[in-house]
Amino acid sequence: MGDNKQIKDGLGNLFTLRMRDVSPGTDGTLQQNEMFATLVPREYQTGGMYQHCAKSNAVLLPALATTTATGTGTASATNLTVSAVTGTIIVGATVTGTGIPAGTTIVNQQSGTTGGAGVYTTSASTTASAAALTFTYTAPSTPNVPIYSFQYPGTLSAPFLMASVRRVRLSAWSIDAFSAGWITFDIYAARNFTAQDTGGLTATFGADDNQMRTTMAAALANITWCNTALLTPGTRTLDAAPLDSQTVVAPTTANTPFTQQRITLFERLQGEHSLLLAANEGFVVRGTFPGGNHWQFAVTTEWDELAIY
Protein backbone atom coordinates (compact mmCIF):
# COMPACT_ATOMS: atom_id res chain seq x y z
CA MET A 1 0.00 0.00 0.00
CA GLY A 2 1.38 3.40 -0.92
CA ASP A 3 1.80 6.44 1.30
CA ASN A 4 1.37 10.12 0.56
CA LYS A 5 4.70 11.97 0.34
CA GLN A 6 5.33 15.67 -0.03
CA ILE A 7 8.05 17.05 -2.28
CA LYS A 8 9.14 20.61 -2.96
CA ASP A 9 9.95 22.06 -6.37
CA GLY A 10 12.56 24.67 -7.15
CA LEU A 11 10.16 27.51 -6.32
CA GLY A 12 9.33 26.11 -2.93
CA ASN A 13 5.89 24.76 -3.90
CA LEU A 14 4.78 21.61 -2.12
CA PHE A 15 3.28 18.66 -4.03
CA THR A 16 1.78 15.45 -2.68
CA LEU A 17 2.60 12.20 -4.49
CA ARG A 18 1.57 8.63 -3.86
CA MET A 19 4.71 6.65 -3.11
CA ARG A 20 5.39 3.01 -2.37
CA ASP A 21 8.32 1.57 -0.41
CA VAL A 22 10.14 -0.90 -2.72
CA SER A 23 13.41 -1.07 -0.78
CA PRO A 24 14.71 -4.61 -0.09
CA GLY A 25 14.46 -4.10 3.65
CA THR A 26 11.25 -2.06 3.49
CA ASP A 27 13.13 0.67 5.32
CA GLY A 28 12.05 3.53 3.08
CA THR A 29 15.41 3.94 1.34
CA LEU A 30 13.88 3.25 -2.10
CA GLN A 31 10.52 4.80 -2.99
CA GLN A 32 8.51 4.30 -6.18
CA ASN A 33 6.07 6.86 -7.51
CA GLU A 34 2.64 5.27 -8.06
CA MET A 35 1.56 7.85 -10.63
CA PHE A 36 2.12 6.29 -14.06
CA ALA A 37 2.35 8.08 -17.39
CA THR A 38 1.17 5.06 -19.40
CA LEU A 39 -1.20 2.13 -18.99
CA VAL A 40 1.82 -0.11 -18.35
CA PRO A 41 2.98 -0.02 -14.71
CA ARG A 42 6.74 0.10 -14.19
CA GLU A 43 6.73 -3.36 -12.64
CA TYR A 44 4.15 -6.09 -12.30
CA GLN A 45 5.91 -8.24 -9.73
CA THR A 46 4.23 -11.63 -10.33
CA GLY A 47 1.42 -10.35 -12.56
CA GLY A 48 1.30 -9.01 -16.09
CA MET A 49 -0.75 -7.56 -18.92
CA TYR A 50 -2.95 -9.84 -21.04
CA GLN A 51 -5.26 -9.93 -24.05
CA HIS A 52 -7.45 -12.89 -24.96
CA CYS A 53 -9.96 -13.50 -27.75
CA ALA A 54 -12.71 -16.06 -27.09
CA LYS A 55 -14.28 -17.24 -30.35
CA SER A 56 -17.36 -19.44 -30.47
CA ASN A 57 -18.50 -22.11 -32.88
CA ALA A 58 -22.07 -21.95 -34.26
CA VAL A 59 -24.21 -21.20 -31.21
CA LEU A 60 -27.84 -22.31 -31.37
CA LEU A 61 -30.20 -20.03 -29.49
CA PRO A 62 -33.15 -21.79 -27.84
CA ALA A 63 -36.57 -21.56 -29.45
CA LEU A 64 -38.71 -18.69 -28.24
CA ALA A 65 -40.76 -19.61 -25.19
CA THR A 66 -44.45 -20.31 -25.86
CA THR A 67 -47.21 -20.00 -23.25
CA THR A 68 -50.69 -21.48 -23.85
CA ALA A 69 -53.97 -20.85 -22.01
CA THR A 70 -57.53 -22.00 -22.65
CA GLY A 71 -60.97 -20.64 -21.75
CA THR A 72 -64.57 -20.17 -22.82
CA GLY A 73 -65.29 -16.93 -24.66
CA THR A 74 -68.26 -14.85 -25.73
CA ALA A 75 -67.64 -11.77 -27.89
CA SER A 76 -69.25 -8.48 -28.72
CA ALA A 77 -67.25 -6.69 -31.44
CA THR A 78 -63.74 -6.36 -29.98
CA ASN A 79 -64.82 -7.11 -26.41
CA LEU A 80 -64.19 -10.72 -25.42
CA THR A 81 -65.49 -12.09 -22.12
CA VAL A 82 -63.55 -15.15 -21.03
CA SER A 83 -64.40 -17.60 -18.23
CA ALA A 84 -63.13 -21.00 -17.00
CA VAL A 85 -59.54 -20.01 -17.76
CA THR A 86 -56.76 -22.59 -17.48
CA GLY A 87 -53.26 -21.11 -17.57
CA THR A 88 -52.51 -17.41 -17.99
CA ILE A 89 -53.74 -15.21 -20.83
CA ILE A 90 -50.94 -12.83 -21.84
CA VAL A 91 -51.42 -9.56 -23.69
CA GLY A 92 -50.20 -10.16 -27.25
CA ALA A 93 -51.41 -13.76 -27.31
CA THR A 94 -52.99 -15.08 -30.51
CA VAL A 95 -56.58 -16.27 -30.08
CA THR A 96 -58.00 -19.26 -31.96
CA GLY A 97 -61.42 -20.91 -31.86
CA THR A 98 -64.90 -20.75 -33.40
CA GLY A 99 -65.87 -17.21 -34.38
CA ILE A 100 -62.31 -15.87 -34.13
CA PRO A 101 -60.73 -14.47 -37.36
CA ALA A 102 -57.21 -15.72 -38.13
CA GLY A 103 -54.45 -13.61 -36.61
CA THR A 104 -56.59 -12.07 -33.85
CA THR A 105 -54.60 -11.12 -30.77
CA ILE A 106 -55.27 -9.85 -27.25
CA VAL A 107 -54.64 -6.10 -27.09
CA ASN A 108 -55.31 -5.50 -23.39
CA GLN A 109 -57.36 -6.67 -20.42
CA GLN A 110 -60.26 -4.43 -19.40
CA SER A 111 -61.33 -6.11 -16.16
CA GLY A 112 -61.21 -9.30 -14.13
CA THR A 113 -58.38 -11.37 -12.66
CA THR A 114 -55.08 -10.51 -14.32
CA GLY A 115 -54.43 -13.18 -16.95
CA GLY A 116 -57.58 -15.04 -15.90
CA ALA A 117 -61.34 -14.71 -16.18
CA GLY A 118 -62.40 -11.26 -17.33
CA VAL A 119 -63.04 -8.98 -20.29
CA TYR A 120 -60.35 -8.55 -22.93
CA THR A 121 -59.95 -6.31 -25.98
CA THR A 122 -59.11 -8.11 -29.25
CA SER A 123 -57.35 -6.75 -32.32
CA ALA A 124 -60.34 -7.63 -34.53
CA SER A 125 -64.10 -8.03 -34.08
CA THR A 126 -65.09 -11.60 -33.24
CA THR A 127 -68.37 -13.56 -33.09
CA ALA A 128 -67.48 -16.19 -30.50
CA SER A 129 -70.41 -17.45 -28.40
CA ALA A 130 -69.55 -19.71 -25.47
CA ALA A 131 -66.73 -20.99 -27.69
CA ALA A 132 -63.73 -23.01 -26.57
CA LEU A 133 -60.75 -20.70 -27.15
CA THR A 134 -56.98 -21.13 -27.09
CA PHE A 135 -54.60 -18.26 -26.30
CA THR A 136 -51.01 -18.77 -27.53
CA TYR A 137 -48.24 -16.33 -26.65
CA THR A 138 -44.72 -16.57 -28.08
CA ALA A 139 -42.10 -14.44 -26.34
CA PRO A 140 -40.54 -11.86 -28.70
CA SER A 141 -37.01 -12.67 -27.55
CA THR A 142 -34.80 -14.98 -25.51
CA PRO A 143 -33.75 -12.67 -22.65
CA ASN A 144 -30.58 -12.33 -20.60
CA VAL A 145 -28.74 -15.47 -21.64
CA PRO A 146 -25.07 -15.74 -20.55
CA ILE A 147 -22.58 -16.01 -23.39
CA TYR A 148 -19.23 -15.05 -21.78
CA SER A 149 -17.91 -15.23 -18.23
CA PHE A 150 -14.68 -13.83 -16.72
CA GLN A 151 -13.85 -14.93 -13.17
CA TYR A 152 -10.79 -13.82 -11.22
CA PRO A 153 -9.80 -16.26 -8.45
CA GLY A 154 -7.05 -14.07 -7.00
CA THR A 155 -4.34 -15.57 -4.81
CA LEU A 156 -4.64 -17.16 -1.36
CA SER A 157 -1.16 -16.14 -0.22
CA ALA A 158 1.24 -13.27 -0.79
CA PRO A 159 1.73 -11.64 -3.18
CA PHE A 160 -1.99 -10.89 -3.35
CA LEU A 161 -3.10 -9.95 -6.87
CA MET A 162 -6.09 -8.25 -8.40
CA ALA A 163 -7.26 -7.92 -12.00
CA SER A 164 -7.73 -4.56 -13.70
CA VAL A 165 -10.08 -4.88 -16.70
CA ARG A 166 -9.48 -2.15 -19.27
CA ARG A 167 -11.46 -3.14 -22.35
CA VAL A 168 -14.05 -5.72 -23.48
CA ARG A 169 -15.10 -5.80 -27.13
CA LEU A 170 -17.41 -8.10 -29.07
CA SER A 171 -17.96 -8.94 -32.72
CA ALA A 172 -20.82 -11.15 -33.90
CA TRP A 173 -22.39 -12.42 -37.10
CA SER A 174 -25.44 -14.42 -38.14
CA ILE A 175 -25.34 -17.92 -39.58
CA ASP A 176 -29.12 -18.12 -39.96
CA ALA A 177 -31.32 -15.13 -40.73
CA PHE A 178 -32.90 -13.61 -37.62
CA SER A 179 -36.45 -12.40 -37.32
CA ALA A 180 -36.75 -8.64 -37.43
CA GLY A 181 -36.03 -7.15 -34.03
CA TRP A 182 -33.27 -6.10 -31.68
CA ILE A 183 -30.29 -7.79 -30.06
CA THR A 184 -28.98 -6.41 -26.77
CA PHE A 185 -25.67 -7.18 -25.06
CA ASP A 186 -25.24 -6.34 -21.36
CA ILE A 187 -22.07 -6.56 -19.28
CA TYR A 188 -22.57 -7.14 -15.54
CA ALA A 189 -20.11 -7.05 -12.66
CA ALA A 190 -20.19 -10.35 -10.73
CA ARG A 191 -19.57 -10.56 -6.96
CA ASN A 192 -19.07 -13.62 -4.76
CA PHE A 193 -18.01 -15.48 -7.89
CA THR A 194 -16.93 -18.79 -6.38
CA ALA A 195 -17.83 -21.21 -9.19
CA GLN A 196 -17.34 -20.47 -12.89
CA ASP A 197 -20.10 -20.85 -15.48
CA THR A 198 -20.15 -24.19 -17.32
CA GLY A 199 -21.24 -25.68 -20.62
CA GLY A 200 -18.82 -23.95 -22.98
CA LEU A 201 -15.13 -23.59 -23.78
CA THR A 202 -12.56 -22.55 -21.17
CA ALA A 203 -9.30 -20.68 -21.70
CA THR A 204 -6.11 -22.34 -20.46
CA PHE A 205 -3.25 -19.96 -19.69
CA GLY A 206 0.25 -21.40 -19.61
CA ALA A 207 3.68 -19.82 -19.48
CA ASP A 208 3.41 -18.34 -22.98
CA ASP A 209 -0.29 -17.71 -23.50
CA ASN A 210 -1.68 -14.25 -24.16
CA GLN A 211 0.90 -12.26 -22.17
CA MET A 212 1.84 -8.93 -23.68
CA ARG A 213 5.46 -9.69 -22.74
CA THR A 214 7.10 -13.11 -22.59
CA THR A 215 8.57 -12.59 -19.12
CA MET A 216 5.17 -11.93 -17.56
CA ALA A 217 3.60 -14.66 -15.45
CA ALA A 218 0.79 -16.88 -16.70
CA ALA A 219 -2.65 -15.31 -16.27
CA LEU A 220 -4.78 -16.43 -13.34
CA ALA A 221 -8.14 -15.42 -14.86
CA ASN A 222 -10.77 -18.06 -15.61
CA ILE A 223 -12.60 -17.37 -18.88
CA THR A 224 -15.53 -19.42 -20.20
CA TRP A 225 -17.71 -18.77 -23.25
CA CYS A 226 -20.52 -20.59 -25.01
CA ASN A 227 -19.50 -22.61 -28.04
CA THR A 228 -22.54 -24.43 -29.44
CA ALA A 229 -25.11 -23.85 -26.67
CA LEU A 230 -25.62 -21.27 -23.94
CA LEU A 231 -23.73 -21.26 -20.65
CA THR A 232 -25.10 -22.60 -17.37
CA PRO A 233 -24.54 -19.95 -14.66
CA GLY A 234 -22.13 -20.81 -11.86
CA THR A 235 -22.15 -19.49 -8.30
CA ARG A 236 -22.14 -15.70 -8.57
CA THR A 237 -24.18 -12.60 -7.80
CA LEU A 238 -24.64 -10.10 -10.62
CA ASP A 239 -25.17 -6.42 -9.93
CA ALA A 240 -28.78 -5.28 -10.29
CA ALA A 241 -27.93 -3.13 -13.32
CA PRO A 242 -25.33 -3.69 -16.06
CA LEU A 243 -22.11 -1.71 -16.33
CA ASP A 244 -23.06 -0.98 -19.93
CA SER A 245 -25.53 -2.08 -22.59
CA GLN A 246 -25.36 -2.07 -26.38
CA THR A 247 -28.30 -2.73 -28.74
CA VAL A 248 -28.05 -3.57 -32.44
CA VAL A 249 -30.50 -4.45 -35.20
CA ALA A 250 -30.89 -8.21 -35.66
CA PRO A 251 -29.62 -9.20 -39.14
CA THR A 252 -32.47 -10.63 -41.22
CA THR A 253 -30.07 -12.29 -43.68
CA ALA A 254 -27.67 -15.17 -43.11
CA ASN A 255 -23.90 -14.72 -42.76
CA THR A 256 -24.16 -11.04 -41.90
CA PRO A 257 -22.17 -9.10 -39.26
CA PHE A 258 -24.27 -7.59 -36.49
CA THR A 259 -22.28 -4.36 -36.90
CA GLN A 260 -19.52 -3.15 -39.21
CA GLN A 261 -17.30 -2.29 -36.24
CA ARG A 262 -16.65 -4.25 -33.09
CA ILE A 263 -19.04 -3.52 -30.23
CA THR A 264 -17.29 -1.98 -27.22
CA LEU A 265 -18.94 -3.36 -24.09
CA PHE A 266 -16.50 -1.80 -21.62
CA GLU A 267 -13.55 0.56 -22.01
CA ARG A 268 -11.47 2.70 -19.66
CA LEU A 269 -8.84 5.00 -21.14
CA GLN A 270 -5.72 6.34 -19.47
CA GLY A 271 -6.68 8.33 -16.40
CA GLU A 272 -10.07 6.61 -16.06
CA HIS A 273 -10.83 4.05 -13.36
CA SER A 274 -10.76 0.48 -14.65
CA LEU A 275 -12.89 -2.38 -13.35
CA LEU A 276 -10.83 -3.74 -10.43
CA LEU A 277 -11.50 -7.33 -9.48
CA ALA A 278 -10.43 -8.84 -6.17
CA ALA A 279 -10.50 -12.58 -5.48
CA ASN A 280 -13.74 -14.27 -6.61
CA GLU A 281 -15.02 -11.33 -8.59
CA GLY A 282 -15.54 -10.95 -12.33
CA PHE A 283 -17.98 -9.99 -15.03
CA VAL A 284 -20.54 -11.69 -17.27
CA VAL A 285 -21.78 -10.78 -20.75
CA ARG A 286 -25.44 -11.59 -21.38
CA GLY A 287 -27.51 -11.26 -24.54
CA THR A 288 -31.17 -10.89 -25.48
CA PHE A 289 -32.03 -12.29 -28.91
CA PRO A 290 -34.81 -13.28 -31.26
CA GLY A 291 -34.52 -17.03 -30.62
CA GLY A 292 -34.07 -20.22 -32.57
CA ASN A 293 -31.15 -19.07 -34.71
CA HIS A 294 -27.48 -19.99 -35.17
CA TRP A 295 -24.88 -17.26 -34.76
CA GLN A 296 -21.19 -16.83 -33.90
CA PHE A 297 -19.25 -14.30 -31.86
CA ALA A 298 -15.84 -13.35 -30.51
CA VAL A 299 -15.11 -11.47 -27.27
CA THR A 300 -11.72 -9.83 -26.72
CA THR A 301 -10.76 -8.84 -23.17
CA GLU A 302 -7.73 -6.77 -22.15
CA TRP A 303 -6.72 -6.81 -18.51
CA ASP A 304 -3.81 -6.51 -16.07
CA GLU A 305 -2.99 -8.64 -13.05
CA LEU A 306 -1.00 -6.73 -10.44
CA ALA A 307 -0.27 -6.56 -6.73
CA ILE A 308 -3.09 -5.23 -4.57
CA TYR A 309 -2.49 -1.63 -3.59
Image: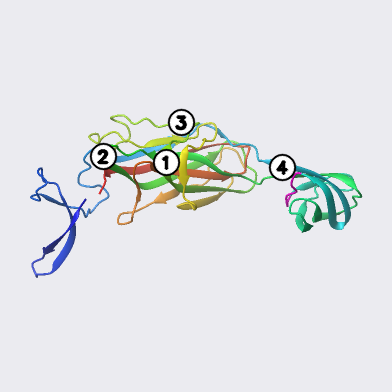
Other residues around mark 1 within 10 Å, as few (<14) / some (14–19) / many (≥20): many
Residue shown at 80%/52% (left/top)? Answer: 117
233, above or below 121, in the image: above
Q: Position of residue 164 (x, y in %)?
A: 33, 46
> Which tag, 3 or 1, sits closer to the chain's start?
1
State yes or no: residue 88 in magenta: yes
Residue shown at 77%/47% (left/top)? Answer: 94
Q: Position of residue 25 (x, y in %)?
A: 9, 44
Q: Which residue is mark 1?
A: 193
State yes or no: residue 268 in magenta: no
Q: Nearer the viewer, residue 182 or 78?
A: 78
Q: Which residue is mark 4?
A: 67
The Cα atoms of the two marked residues, 1 and 4, are separated by: 33 Å
Numbered circle sitting on residue 47: 2
Other residues around mark 3 within 10 Å, as few (<14) / some (14–19) / many (≥20): some
Residue shown at 40%/37% (left/top)? Answer: 53
Q: Amino acid at mark 1?
A: Phe
Quick one: SS at disc 2? loop
- Mark 2 or 1: the one toward you: 1
Q: Which residue is mark 3?
A: 201
Which stretch appears magenta?
A: 87-92
The Cα atoms of the two marked residues, 4 and 3, are separated by: 32 Å
